[in-house]
Amino acid sequence: MFRMVDMQVIESLKQLKQINIDYYLAAHGARQNGKFVAYVNAFTPVELLYAMDFIPIYPENHAVILGARKLSSETAAAAEGMGYSMDLCSYARCDLGSIRIGVSPTWGLPKPDILIVSNSQCSTLTKWFEVLARMYKAPMVLLDVPHSGDGERDAAAEEYVQGQLEDLAKTLENITKKTLDTTKLHETIELSQEASDLWTRILETGQAIPAPMSVFDQFISMAPIVAQRGTRVPVDFYRCLLDELEQRIQNEIGAVPNERHRLFWDNLPIWPELRRLSLFLAERGVCLVTSLYTWAWARLSVGAQNPFRDWTDQYLYTANLHLQRRIDDYVELAQRYSLDGFLYHSNRSCKFVSQDIPEVKVAVTKRTGLPGLILEADHNDPRLYSVEVLENQIDNFLDVLASRKKQAS
Amino acid sequence: MNDNEPWEPFEKMVATRWDRSRTYKQETGCKVVGHLLPDVPEELIHAAGGLPVAVWGAGVAMSHAQAHIPGYTCSHAMGALELGFRQELDFLDGMVIPYVCDTTRNMFHIWQQCFPSKKNEFLRLPKRLDYDGAGVYLRREFERLFASIKALCGVAAGPDDLSKSIALFNKGRDLLRKAYSRQKDDPMVWTQARVIHLFESWFLSPKEEHIALMEKLPWGSEEQGGSGERIPIYVRGKVWDPAAILDLFDELKFVLVQDEVVTGYRVAARDGSLDGDPIDALVDRFMKTPPYPGYHFDPERMRESFVERVKTSGAKGVIFLNPKFCEAAGFDTPDFQKGLEEKGIPSIVLETSTRGAAMEQLKVRLEAFREIISEDLP
């Protein structure tokens, strides 16, 4: 049993429940309100979709909710019963299994008018969306983004990606039977920029000592920047959240009472253990102050001048977090956030972000002198790890951190 | 001459993997460029005077690689890394890693980090096969790769050299197709293990030599019967893993009528055109080759066209030889199986990896599958 530590709750986060309810209700009522539904993933132009009366829906977010509500074992197992191997992404298994057995806290997801997927996030989503496209007999558009190996500019790839984005706009026009209203697009882009700026400033509050918000709270509050970028919702919510965090900094209120160790969290969360690990670490005075995953959403705004050009650059270069850049970023974050160490989640369900972790860890430790711990788990399937083993590993790691601090002092 | 003599060089090449490439380099001083298989146009390397050689890690026991890449990685990629650490690939001057999935993308960076002294290239293959811009993009990517390999080899090769390479490769592919066909007509001599060894060794030796050796095969052998008792099957997979599965097919009297394995029929399914621009010919060949699971076009069409290919082949059953941890193959399989089922074609999934597949277990499952198919035969 955990001893409840004296954590001072962030009041703004209480708005999230209603924000999420409103979002899913709007999605389910899309057709009655003359709107369309598009299934999307990260690195798709949601500002364009909102401007063209589409509500973007993230099957990944649906899977997250299943995981956080402890429904992932049941839904993932249902997908395995459909023939999907346990080695496949657990987000996909949970979502497909949920459709199969009708278990969903969001009343399922509305059927899509189109599925749009960008493989600059990962290739798994393309395959998952192919399954959904066959299931719903809906059209699917892949935004094929050839990863420039080390981030070098590639004119041929730029033409290829921008051409696909421009064609996507035409496809959306064909579905809605309306032409793209550029004034409306500029509005959604401005709102998206504002939300991204606010989100960036929220993430930067983690530099304060003590950090007013932990990565666990960042994970919970991500939904609006992911799904509603381009609307007023994230702007209003993040402005309120930022005000509260700035107030907490002024009053020296930390996310974790008696903050002793400041750590980085690499990769996606372990959603089914979010609360448990949050309390476990808080009890030990450990605050996760920044993470790769939450920063990904701070880099997604585009300019209204030439958005197609900007989306192209973003998907090709910003989203291309290749090994060397990842190492450089982590080294920089170590300094900016006064880190004591790194927790790397080697995530069985996300090979894309996990396979190079051993190389990242060695290089980052070499350059910063900071230790790191690799935790092998899964972002949504609790059958693939033991939380007790993870906690033991973390405890041992904290002993190392404590002895390092002792030696240093 | 014993009956096995013409086949021995191929068996030896497969058994010793890179020995011939290594000695060839010593003899000629040419540059050797390795690659991780799917759809790397070897003609570009050949035309530049280099020796292309495929690296596949399936079947390799792991030791060093586990410190550099997690265990939930397919054995093809993990094994290739292991071979690098064992210094078995030291003779390679360059390495081309094709971007066909998330693992190959990560592999490129890990490989580069671990083996920076080689000329490493990431071949960014487009995934969107039903989009015109993909061909335009691929042409420029092939040009970029060609320029890089020419620089490595120090050779100023041009379109004529590339056309000559395509013609040579077409000659080899023609023989490979004929050999594949012979296994159906004369399965006692042209066993599946022997024929697939021809395909695998194609990637492990100089093409001129390979073609000369293939020409010595017993093309005139008389049909010895037995094909009528065999059950025609279709295989979808990455590489022949475990390698002994081919002997199992022979033993259980299955006969491969078609496959989509990258070290199988897919190698020879399409020739490069000799009319027009040779790089366009390679692009066209890529676009028309049966798609690798990581590629995309209309999802319903993906399933339908697969079922059509199986039906056209005359196969009575399909084996999905899915590498463990391969997401592309894993997501396709249930829907593809459903499509086959609707047409009354039975199928089986064998999730294989040297770390997980036991031959006895595979045998039992394939025997049961054979019985299921046999009941459907007239």
Image (cartoon, coloured by chain):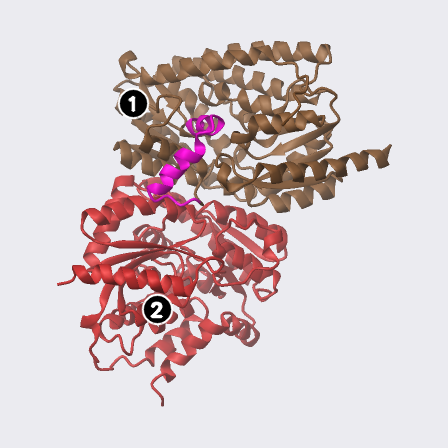
The crowding category of the residue bearing disc 1, from other C-alpha atoms within 10 Å (few below 14, some 14 to 19, many at least 20), is some
* In the image, residue A262 lies in the stretch drawn in magenta: no
Nearer to us in this view, A365 or A259: A259
Left or right: residue B24 versus residue A132 is: right
Q: Is residue B2 above or below residue A83?
A: below
Residue farthest to the front? Answer: A1
Q: Quadrant of residue A363?
A: top right
The chain letter of the brown chain reads A
Residue labelled with disc 2: B248
Residue B72 image position (x, y, % from top left): 51, 49
Name the quadrant containing residue A55.
Answer: top left
Q: Residue at x 48, y 52 (%)?
A: B74
- Vertical placement of residue A345 versus B39, above or below: above
* Extent of the magenta region: A61-86
Considering the numbered disc 1 on the image, is that residue within a helix, a strand or a loop? Answer: helix
Image check: A351 left or right of B273? right
Q: Nearer the viewer, residue B153 or A34?
A: A34
For the residues carrying marks 2 and 1, which lies nearer the camera in this image?
Answer: 2
Q: Position of residue B146 (x, y in %)?
A: 47, 55
In the rendered image, residue A77 lying in the magenta stretch gets the answer: yes
Q: Amino acid at mark 2?
A: Leu
Residue at image point 42% right, 79% down: B9
Q: Mark 2 to mark 1: distance in Å?
A: 54 Å
Identify the chain of the residue marked 1, using the numbered disc in the image: A
Which residue lies most toward the bottom here?
B1
Does residue A167 appear in this view? no
Which chain corresponds to the colour red? B
Which residue is at the far right?
A: A409
Instruction: Specify whether B336 is left or right of B50.
Output: left
B59 versus A368 height, above or below: below
Secondary structure under the numbered disc 2 in the rendered image: helix
Q: Where does the image place residue A68, in percent across and percent down from the top left?
A: 49, 27
